[in-house]
Image (spheres, helix red, strand yellow):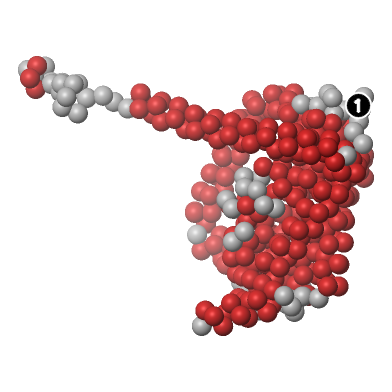
Amino acid sequence: DVVGWFKSLWEALTGIGFGYLVAGWWLQTVQTTLTALGWYFILCAGYPTTPPLYRQVLAAYAAGVALNGFLPANIGTFVMLLMFIAIIPEANLPGVLGGMLVQKIFFTLAGAFVYVYLFASVSGTFERQFELPHDHPGLVLAIATGAVLLIVVLLRIFRRKLPGLIHRAKQGGAILARPRVYLVRVFLPSFGAWLAKLGVIAVFLAGYGIAVTFHTVMSVMGGNSIANMVSVTPGGVGVNQGTNVAALGDVTDAATATAYSLGQQLAVTAWNVAFAVALVIWAFGWRGGRELVEHSYADAKVKVAEQKEKRAAERAAKRSTGDRRAPRLRPRRDASPADEPGPHTG
């Protein structure tokens, strides 16, 4: 009953109350401002002689978040980084990329926590894992040995590349030289932003009548994380809905789960765009903000295209290297010239 399914989907999509929207938008604003606060302290530590204004960092981050909502390939992230370079005279791309690595530390740990929780919450997980060493000790020993060798090889490779990485990202990662400052000014705001994100999910789940538990929120959070990693569509449209339906399959029907996912994505994206426009105008003015975003967007598209070309060139180089290493067939000594392939024989 496709018509009936779309009817129930539309009813669920338009069934959320305005109070839930306001609460979700407020929590989304908290998430954006706290994440931008961490970025601000990272950039101030990296470029102390020409530190940016917080409202400029907030506007740049909000613009990147808004653009990622409807543009593919995370172009919004490149726009944000290039806006940072534009507002900080001493900044360069390696430096802000180093800052992004610092900014991602907490969120990487938080994502790992979500995955570990979801893995542990599957019934019988640990029983099955603990049975393996008892039943197959040789296999477990071989796996452990292989894991240790892999770690040793990776560490040797990483040690060779580490000096160059540190040199290029030295300014962006300057705040890590003061662990206590990093903890207070970056880690804690990031933790608050992560909690606000969980709050956004919980509010919209409640708005669509879906049971709000720690497990359902973690399931949606993990599904969205996976969707963001594998998505090729603008804003992850379609992939997010698929993962949310799978994550909420035990607590609600597919129509309600799809309506929740679409409703949250549309509402949050619309708010991010409006919030970003207001912040860019406040921080840079209408004309200056428009020119800054347009130029950063144009440069971001060039950077994305350059990355694609670089990856394609690397793949072509690897293929050509493999072709050169492949053995070539030599004609037999007793073969006549007529037997050898000519230019027109293919």
Query: Horizontal and vertical percent for residue 78?
Result: 70, 38
Instruction: Specify the farthest residue to the front.
Output: 287
Local secondary structure at mark 1:
loop
Q: Quadrant of residue 301?
A: top right
> In the displayed structure, would residue 253 be above or below residue 105?
below
> In the displayed structure, would residue 294 be above or below residue 272?
above
94 or 159: nearer the viewer? 94
**Looking at the figure, which quarter contains the C terminus?**
top left
250 or 261: nearer the viewer? 261
153 displayed left or right of 52: left
Q: Residues within 10 Å of mark 1 (few under 14, many from 20)?
A: some
Q: Residue tagged by mark 1?
A: 50
7 displayed left or right of 290: left
Residue occupying image coordinates x 55% and y 35%: 308
Residue type (three-letter) at the residue carrying disc 1: Thr
Residue occupying image coordinates x 84% and y 25%: 89
Query: Horizontal and vertical percent for residue 284?
Result: 87, 38
